[in-house]
Amino acid sequence: MRLTKAEFVHAVQAYQNHMQQLSQVEQATKWTLCESPLFNIANEYYNLLLELCDIPCDGQWNDLDYFVYELDFGAKWHPGCCTDNQGNDIPLSTPEEVYDALCASWGGMKQ
């Protein structure tokens, strides 16, 4: 991981804000932007975030994908939705918690 916790949180929040703005434009205009250059910029930003987190961009599902896309940036997290091998909850409702989970699973990340 080449990012500190603060840098990671800032980057995830910036990506979330960009995606929310794209969604608002889509709703207001009834346009689909998923093939537009604006969406491509978001994809490039996300891929850079993965690279800086040393998460492979190989098409395989990863923890950050799960947080962003399945948990809607943590809004859909609830107890029991993500657990370790012993059945303990892994909190993933905020970027800070995702960073902590990544640190716990990989070790050696910058704090």
Image (cartoon, rainbow, N blue to C red):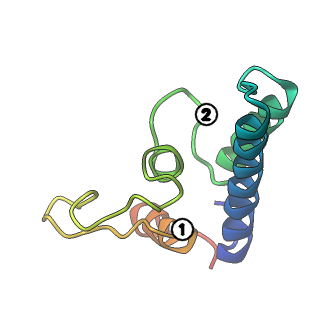
Callout 1 crowding tier (Cα within 10 Å): few <14, some 14–19, many ≥20: many
Mark 2 Cα within 10 Å, few/some/many (few <14, many 20+)? some
Q: In the image, residue 35 lies at what x, y percent?
A: 75, 20
Q: Is residue 4 left or right of residue 67?
A: right
Q: Nearer the N terminus, badge 1 or badge 2?
A: 2
Residue 41: where, in percent of width, then height? 83, 35
Return the x and y of residue 25 as percentages of the image width and height. Answer: 79, 40
What residue type is disc 2 on? Cys
The numbered disc on residue 57 is 2
| Front residue of 102 and 14 | 14
In the rendered image, the residue lying farthest to the bottom is 111
> Residue drawn 52% across and 51% down?
64
For the N terminus, the image quarter is bottom right
Q: Quadrant of the C terminus?
A: bottom right
Q: CA distance from mark 1 to mark 2?
A: 18 Å
80 displayed left or right of 15: left
Dot 2: element: loop
Disc 1 secondary structure class: helix
